[in-house]
């Protein structure tokens, strides 16, 4: 068990040390930070614009981060021979891949937490329909610069990794800054403002969505390269957005009926109906429904997300991500890692 936690810790460090992880993190917080500047082009919809855009940025960048980090921590280690060194020690294949997956989930959790906190700060900046809070916006970007400067100084004095410390500093500073801004500025009178508890409930549902992306990317990283991994994950993401539509159209379509036209009419109809139901269920099983985790519409209508819905969403994430984790273990169990290391 001690070896497992060490592998998790090392995987987490590898993820946050990657320059691409810090780059995507910095791009995300900066994009979310400038969202309030676009609220001058809408009327009484400034908060909705910021919320929708911030959540979309978090999901899309979460997909890219999950794919790149899983490829760096799994695919690259199989190619440079690190896996052979680890497996020569008392480390089983299943514990190795599960530790990699757990460390990746921890890095994605930090990623989502930081971008979610940045989104709430952007809401506080854009809370007024006629102006943006320039002092808070300036303080936000100054805080990001100070975090990077502190990491640079620490890197110069201690020789530590700049990207990992900058990411950690921002993850600590930005949530505290958003809380301080809310306490100091208070709740605005604008009716479009999203209450903090409603926003927290919506952001909580982004965590399982990003975790599912990480589980899919980790399973694919055991067999394919980074480009193929990113392509498949992007396709699953796009198809998952319309998974209900695909399943509904398939079950109502008449095209599969032609497969059973050679049977008697009554038998063909019943067999085709069962066939379409099974195929529709398989499609829903393999395509994650991202709409379960998208609560931007609920925030726009000021609807409080029930606690039971959040619990069931996390159960859905556990089952779905667990299935992909089992698949990752199965794919890696018979994987020939020595060939990759030699090449």
Image (cartoon, rainbow, N blue to C red):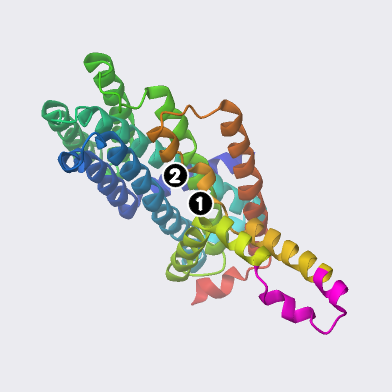
Cβ–Cβ under 8 Å for marks 2 and 1: yes
Residue 205's place in the image compared with 93, above or below, is above
Q: Is residue 82 left or right of residue 262?
A: left
* Count of marks placed on residues: 2
Q: Residue at x 22, y 42 (%)?
A: 35
Say whether disc 2 or disc 1 marks the residue closer to the N-terminus. Answer: 2
295 inside magenta stretch: no
Q: Quadrant of residue 296?
A: top left
Magenta segment boundaries in residue numbering = 253-269
Q: Specify few, some or many for label 2: CA neighbours under 10 Å numbering under 14, 14-19, or 20 or more.
A: many
**184 to the left or right of 15:** left
At 45% from the left edge and 58% from the top edge, which residue is drawn?
67
Q: Residue at x 26, y 15 (%)?
A: 186
Query: What secondary structure characterizes most of the magenta part?
Result: helix
The image position of residue 146, as x and y in percent, is 17, 33
Label at residue 108: 2
Image mark for residue 214: 1
Residue 90 seen in the figure:
no
From the viewer's perspective, is 40 left or right of 90? left
Is 41 on the left or on the right of 12, as rendered? left
Q: Quadrant of residue 197?
A: top left
Tell me residue 12's x, y (percent). 45, 44
């Amino acid at each position: 068990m001690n070896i497992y936690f060490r592998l998790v810790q090392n995987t987490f460090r590898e993820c946050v040390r990657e320059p691409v992880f810090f780059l995507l993190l910095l791009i995300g917080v900066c994009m979310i930070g400038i969202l309030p500047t676009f609220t001058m082009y809408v009327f009484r919809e400034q908060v909705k614009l910021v919320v929708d855009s911030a959540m979309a940025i978090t999901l899309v960048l979460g997909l890219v981060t999950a794919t790149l980090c899983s490829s760096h921590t799994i695919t690259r280690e199989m190619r440079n021979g690190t896996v052979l060194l680890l497996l020569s020690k008392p480390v089983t294949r299943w514990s190795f891949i599960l530790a990699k997956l757990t460390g990746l989930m921890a890095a994605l959790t930090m990623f989502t937490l930081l971008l979610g906190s940045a989104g709430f700060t952007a809401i506080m900046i854009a809370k007024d329909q006629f102006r943006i809070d320039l002092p808070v916006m300036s303080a936000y970007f100054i805080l990001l610069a100070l975090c990077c400067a502190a990491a640079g100084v620490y890197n110069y004095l201690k020789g530590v990794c700049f990207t990992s410390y900058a990411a950690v500093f921002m993850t600590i500073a930005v949530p505290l800054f958003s809380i301080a801004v809310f306490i100091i500025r208070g709740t605005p009178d604008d009716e479009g403002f999203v209450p903090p508890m409603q926003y927290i409930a919506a952001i909580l549902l982004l965590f399982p969505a990003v975790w599912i992306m990480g589980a899919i990317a980790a399973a694919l990283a055991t067999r394919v390269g980074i480009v193929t991994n990113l392509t498949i994950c992007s396709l699953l993401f796009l198809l998952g957005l319309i998974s209900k539509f695909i399943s509904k159209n398939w079950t109502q379509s008449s095209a599969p009926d032609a497969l059973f036209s050679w049977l008697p009419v009554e038998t063909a109809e019943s067999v085709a109906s069962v066939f379409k139901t099974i195929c529709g269920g398989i499609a829903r099983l393999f395509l994650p429904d991202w709409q379960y985790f998208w609560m931007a519409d609920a925030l726009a209508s000021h609807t409080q997300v029930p606690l039971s819905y959040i619990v069931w969403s996390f159960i859905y994430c556990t089952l779905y991500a667990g299935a992909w984790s089992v698949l990752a273990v199965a794919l890696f169990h018979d994987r020939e890692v020595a060939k990759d290391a030699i090449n």
